[in-house]
Amino acid sequence: MRAVVIDSPGPPGVLRPAEVPEPVPGDDEVLLRVAAAGVNAIDWATRAGAGVAVPAFPAVLGWDVCGTVAAPAGQWRAGDQVFGMLRFPVLAGAYAEYVAAPAAQLARVPDGVDAHTAAALPMAALTVWQTLVTHGGLTAGQRVLVPGAAGGVGHVAVQLAAALGAEVTGTASRANHDFVCGLGASRVVPHDGATARAGEYDVVIDPRGGADFERLLSALRPGGIIVTLKGEAPGMRDLARARGVRAGFTYVQPDGAVLADVADMMAGGGLTAAIERVLPLTEAASAHEIGEAGHVRGKLVLAVA
Ligand SMILES: NC(=O)c1ccc[n+]([C@@H]2O[C@H](COP(=O)([O-])OP(=O)(O)OC[C@H]3O[C@@H](n4cnc5c(N)ncnc54)[C@H](OP(=O)(O)O)[C@@H]3O)[C@@H](O)[C@H]2O)c1
C-alpha cells in the first residue's frame, strides 16, 4: 500500500512516500481504508525525534484518521464511515492507505460531515474534553482562558467551552481575533495579555508549559485549576498549591465513547473543525513545515484516498 514513512528522525524532508505492507488487524481491530489523516503538533515533534518513542524504522506517523471499514470487527460493519485517534501514544500509522484500528477507539462519522473535518478533530477534541471536562470540571457560567485559541486544540476548546455555557477568553494574534470571537469567545486578547485580568478564571489551559505555566497561574481565581498540555515537571503542583490554585495534566488518551459525543455535537452544528489547508498525503513534509511555523488557524489535513 501507499504510505509516507520516515527512516530516521529529522527535518520535514525525512518524510518520504513509500510502498509498505498492508497492516494486519489484531483482535477487536478493524482494517480502515483511510480517506484522510489529521496532522498534529505531536506528529512533527515525533518526526523530529522530540515526540513519542519510535521503536523501529521505517515508521509511519499519524494518529488522527477518518476512513471506511474494509474488514469489520466489534460493532463496525464493512462500509461504515468512522473516525478516531488511534493507539496514542503508541504509533498508529495513519499516514497510509490502510490502517488497523482498535474498534473501541472509533466513532461513526455523522451524516453531512466530510472526511477532512472528521479526520481533523479526534486528537484536538479528546484533548479538550479531557482537559476541560475530565480535569477542569468546567461548568456553565464559569470563566475559562484558552491561550492559542485559533490553533488546533484552542479552536476546539473555545467551541466546547462555549457549548458548555462557560464564558471564554482566548488569546490569539491580531489577525485571528475575529475568527476566535466567531467560535464563541466573548473576549480575545494578545498572547502576552492573557494575564491582564489576574485572578479571574476558574479554568486555564496551558498549551505550552515552561515559563507560561507560572505566568498563567496568576490568571486563576483562588481554587481555580490550570491544566497543562506539556507534561508535569517537578515542583509544578507545589507551585500551584503555594498560589492557592490547583494543577492538572492532560496526556490525551483514545476514547471512542467520547468521540461519539463529539460526533453528536458535530451533527448538531455545535462543533466543527476549521481547516487551514488540505494537502495530498505525498505532501506531508509541506504540512509539517506549515505546522511547525506555529500559526496554523485550525487544522491541517492530509487527503489520502
Ligand atoms: N498533552 C496532550 O495530550 C496534548 C494533546 C494535543 C496537543 N498538545 C500540545 O498542545 C499545544 C497546542 O497544540 P495545537 O494542536 O493547538 O498546536 P497548533 O495548532 O500548532 O497551535 C498553533 C497556535 O499556536 C498559537 N500561538 C502562537 N504563539 C503563541 C503563544 N505565545 N501563546 C499561545 N499560543 C500561541 C497560534 O496562534 P496565532 O496564530 O493566533 O498567533 C496558533 O493558533 C502543542 O504544544 C501540543 O504539543 C498536547
Image: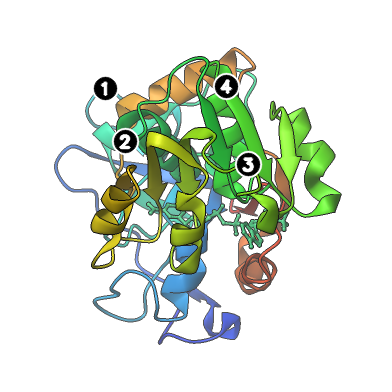
Which of disc 2 and disc 1 is earlier in sequence? 1
**SS label for mark 3:** loop
In this rendering, position of residue 130 left or right of residue 167: left
Distance CA(mark 1)–CA(mark 2)? 29 Å
- The answer to whether the residues at label 3 and label 1 have Cβ atoms under 8 Å apart is no
- What amino acid does circle 2 point to? His
In this rendering, is residue 49 above or below 268? below
Q: Which residue is mark 2?
A: 135
Which of disc 4 and disc 3 is earlier in sequence? 3
Q: Is mark 2 within 8 Å of ligand 1?
A: no
**SS label for mark 1:** loop
Q: Nearer the viewer, residue 140 or 113?
A: 140
Q: Which residue is mark 1?
A: 75
Decide: few, some or many residues near mark 4? Use Cα within 10 Å; few <14, some 14-19, many ≥20: many
Which of disc 1 and disc 4 is earlier in sequence? 1
Q: Which residue is mark 3?
A: 197
- What amino acid does circle 1 point to? Gln
Image quadrant of ligand 1 equals bottom right
Q: Which residue is mark 4?
A: 266
